[in-house]
Image (cartoon, helix red, strand yellow):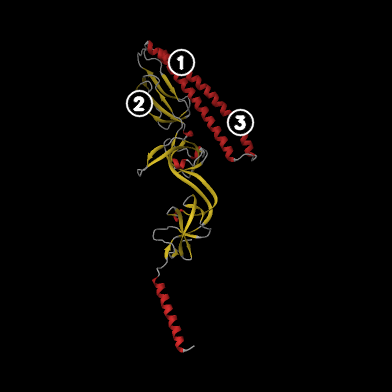
Amino acid sequence: MSVKHRRWIVAAVVVAAVVAAAWWALQSAPRPLDVAAVTRGPLVQRFEEEGRTQLPRRWVLTAPIAGTLRRIDLLQGDAVKAGQLVAVIEPLQGALLDPANRTRLLAEEQAALASMQAAQQRLAAAQADADLAARDAGRMRALGASGVVSVAALDEVEARLARARAAAAAAQAERRAAGQQRAALAALLLGQGRSGGQVVELRAPIDGVVLHRFQESAAPVQAGQSLLELGDLRQLEVMVQALSQQAIALRPGSSARILRWGGAGALPARVTRIEPGGFTKVSALGVEEQRTQVWLDITAPRAQWEPLGDGYRVEVEFEVGRRPDVLQVPSSALFRDGRRWAVYRVAGGRARLTVVTPGMQGDGATEIVAGLRQGERVVAYPDDRIADGLRVRPLAASP
């Protein structure tokens, strides 16, 4: 090879190197981005809603007659026992009953007697249900000890036993309340036309606490005027106004947790019923939403949530789906590309637009049904400045 040819080759190499260096200098530097790995693992789908505690049953004691109420010493929150004297009413002085009112009161007394008898029949039916549930629970406990039945089935029969006993207690309270009403009317009929007459005593129909005291000092009261409201906090439920789209995924027996209720830790709960009717509610942002009421029982021991009272605010976390092993990416990595879902996959130092098929959404992660493989990496937070083929550099903190 001649000297002239060698010079031409050297010059060509130098020119190519200069051109390559200029091209490289004109290229934009790789953009540093957060990337995330495509992983496999468990995925849980849940949502949270605000709720409040509420009693399923309340007992409001009213004045059966017009008269003078003696001062009620009970305060809100005081415990009462079934049959405990809670209020006394003195009939009006010199009250006389005309024939029409006497006939009406006699009819009301007979109605109270009929109500007491009907309540007695309901009590017998409820007690029969409770006895049957107790026998079923005994059999299930024996089977559960030998491992024949599941824990869930045992929990269900225990809950049915608790509901049956609560229904029997409610029927007993209704019978007692009807008996008190009849006794009050009988006392009024007995004391008609007399000066003062016999005092009427009101007794608590249940074991519970005083929720509200409507009348504090001694004062004249009218027949039917509310005096005390009683309730049994052991039967406390939680009511949540959930979005109708989310309530569709719930079923009676679905598990939930009571969060941020004021005490330590979360309280386990179970959905008992989902109301079929919805209603429109305007959110804090002014958006109309369709919601429905979901009721839950707290399954934790009563001693754990004893400070909770009626009408307290809580937050409830519902679990609507769980999968033990799925391919997943952070939910923030997905975006809409037209009518498709896509991610930017990082390969060879560049961002590659990749169409994917998402599945179930969980806690900050989304299942990927198709489009990615385990171990690949994607841009964690894509924006409109990223394009297919853009040179990227994972940040040091990225996996």
Residue at 48% in and 22% down: 176
Measure the alpha-carbon separation of dots 2 and 1: 33 Å
Which of the 4 image quarters holds residue 242?
Answer: top left
| 187 with respect to 134 (left or right) | left
Can you tell which of label 3 and label 2 is closer to the viewer?
A: 3
The picture places residue 276, in percent across and down from the top left corner, at 46, 35
**Residue that label 1 marks:** 110
Residue furthest toward the bottom? Answer: 2
Callout 3 amino acid: Arg
Q: Earlier in the sequence, mark 3 or mark 2?
A: 3
As drawn, the label of residue 391 is: none
* Residue 180 seen in render: yes
**Can the viewer see residue 194?**
no
Which mark sits nearer the N-terminus, 2 or 1? 1
* Residue under the image location 64 percent in, 37 percent down: 143
Q: Indicate which disc residue 217 carries.
A: 2
Q: Position of residue 189 (x, y in %)?
A: 41, 13
The local secondary structure at tag 1 comes to helix
In the depicted structure, whether residue 334 falls above or below residue 301? below
Q: Is residue 115 above or below residue 393?
A: above
Q: Which residue is mark 3?
A: 135
Q: For marks 3 and 2, give the CA distance.
A: 49 Å
**Residue under the point 55% across and 23% down:** 124
Q: Residue furthest top?
A: 99
